[in-house]
Image (cartoon, rainbow, N blue to C red):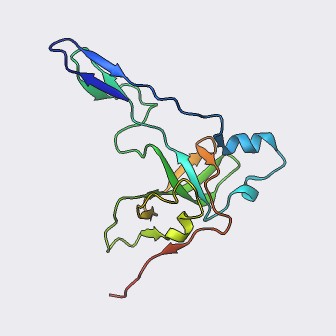
Amino acid sequence: MVEQAAEGNTAIFNIIVRRHDTNSEEFLYQTLKKNRATPIKRLIRQGTLVEVNFGFVQQIARSTAALHTNKRYVDTQLFGEMHKRRLAVVVKVISKDIVQVAPVTSASIAEEDRTSFKISQDTLDKMPRYKDNGKESNLLCSMLETVSTQRILRWAFTEQGLVVTRAITSS
């Protein structure tokens, strides 16, 4: 996290680095690399809940003490792209390295949006990280993303598959 310190005309930034244990994290490609005989479709399939690391939006500290986005380096996250680590549902396993997913958000969805579905609390209760967050989770089918197995974290999924709820009323 970058915080701007108030120091008159001098540009001073406090950079706060928090320790994050990454030893226990394992990405899907690492699992597939350990045992090359295991096909990806045995590990994940359509409807599997996974956690995807979409990256983060970088900030640039200027000498004028202003914080801006990183627009000069196009290999980083750009405005409008999905970012942060979030829950997603596997839509299709395209190849051993590429998976198509639909992201999950905690933002409320419009009632007339027919491309979004609410994920039931019963499904979320089976996953320790999302169990007691107290937020609704909505699946965004209109925002399909194709991601590498290097972005998919292992293992935030349920064996039984996805349970979605949606009240569909006829007009």
Residue 146 versus residue 163 in the image, above or below: above
Residue at far left of view: 8
Percent x, y of residue 56: 43, 37
Name the residue: 43% across, 43% down: 83
Left or right, 129 with respect to 114, comes to right
Q: Residue at x 26, y 23 (%)?
A: 4
| Percent x, y of residue 152 | 60, 46
Q: Residue 28 location, x and y as percent?
A: 67, 45
> Going by the image, does 161 lie left or right of 66?
right
Would you identify the image quadrant in which residue 15 lies? top left
Quarter in which the N terminus is drawn: top left
Residues 65 and 96: in front is: 65
Is residue 162 toward the left or the right of residue 61 in the image?
Answer: right
Residue at the spot 65% in from the left edge and 42% down from the top edge: 27
Please state, as top left, top right, bottom left or bottom right, where the C terminus lies in the image: bottom left
- Viewer can see residue 122: yes
